[in-house]
Image: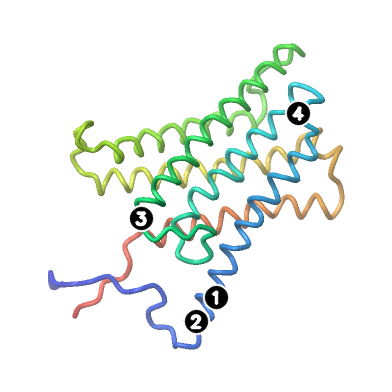
Amino acid sequence: MPADVEYSPVGEGLGMRDFWLYVWMRRISVIAAHVIAVGLTLLISLLSRPGTSLFSWHPVCMSFAYCLCMTEGILLFSAEGSTFCFKSRKGKVRLHWFCQALVLVAAATGVSFMVASKNVSEHPHLITWHSLLGVATLAATLLQVACGVCLLFPKLLRVISPPRMKLYHATCGLVAYLLAMVTVVLAMFSDWFQATVKGVVWWAFLLLPFFSALVVMNQITNAYLPRKKITR
């Protein structure tokens, strides 16, 4: 294979008509993911009735952290359907960091309310798949934040290979997001959620996190996985 190669663009091999259809489908999917991020967060917050109990703040904080802030922080870099109009990547990176900081604050607050609620009711901790995957999600979130800090201060932290660290950051972020969406889905099987939402509406709720996960996974893999190489 010659050394002088370049990566082929997305959609290579498609006809012009098919390519534009592909582009518009991606744009619609990303816009739908934005709508789901906002809508799902609002609906979960309304169903939780925040303030009625210590537990009621847990779904509010966690949905705000992962369904909204993490989703928007990732989709910010999408070329299709981004709700922000920053021309410079530097501006997008700063807003991405702001969203990730909100994820950490909101997630820590949500966990604190859950721990307090369990202690007051004297219920055991970490006995459901939802709680176990929630811990795994927090661990993956901390890893991706650590990689992001290394990218933010590469000289200070003496990062040997920033491109590789960038790949680690994206990978940990993708794992954290997928775990978060699975955790959200598992929460929908809880007694609290099923007592509130039933029937067709419950099935609609169940599918929404999967759609967002597919859009985010497609964006990250397209951005970081090697594409087919072609010679000049």
Looking at the picture, how far across and down is residue 42, in whole percent? Answer: 72, 45
Label whose residue precedes the other's in the sequence (1 or 4): 1
Name the residue beneath numbered marker 3.
Answer: 89
Q: Say if mark 1 contacts mark 2, CB within 8 Å.
A: yes
Q: Say if mark 1 contacts mark 4, CB within 8 Å.
A: no
Left or right? Give the position of 127 relative to 144. Answer: right
Q: CA distance from mark 1 to mark 2?
A: 6 Å
Name the residue beneath numbered marker 2.
Answer: 20
| Residue 24: image tag | 1
Label whose residue precedes the other's in the sequence (1 or 3): 1
Neighbourhood count class around disc 4 (C-alpha, 10 Å): few under 14, some 14–19, many 20 upward: many
Q: Amino acid at mark 4?
A: Ser
Q: Amino acid at mark 3?
A: Arg
Q: Amino acid at mark 2?
A: Trp
Looking at this rendering, what residue extends furthest in the left direction?
A: 3
Looking at the picture, how far across and down is residue 212, in whole percent? Answer: 59, 55
Please tell me whether mark 3 sits on a helix, a strand or a loop.
Answer: helix
Quarter of the view holding residue 35: bottom right
Label whose residue precedes the other's in the sequence (4 or 3): 4
Q: Is residue 103 above or below residue 83?
A: above
Q: Residue at x 63, y 39 (%)?
A: 64
Q: CA distance from mark 3 to mark 2?
A: 25 Å
Neighbourhood count class around disc 2 (C-alpha, 10 Å): few under 14, some 14–19, many 20 upward: few
Left or right? Give the position of 32 relative to 228. Answer: right
Q: Residue at x 70, y 37 (%)?
A: 187
Please tell me whether mark 1 sits on a helix, a strand or a loop.
Answer: helix
Q: CA distance from mark 2 to mark 4?
A: 45 Å
Left or right? Give the position of 171 relative to 23. Answer: left
Name the residue beneath numbered marker 4.
Answer: 56
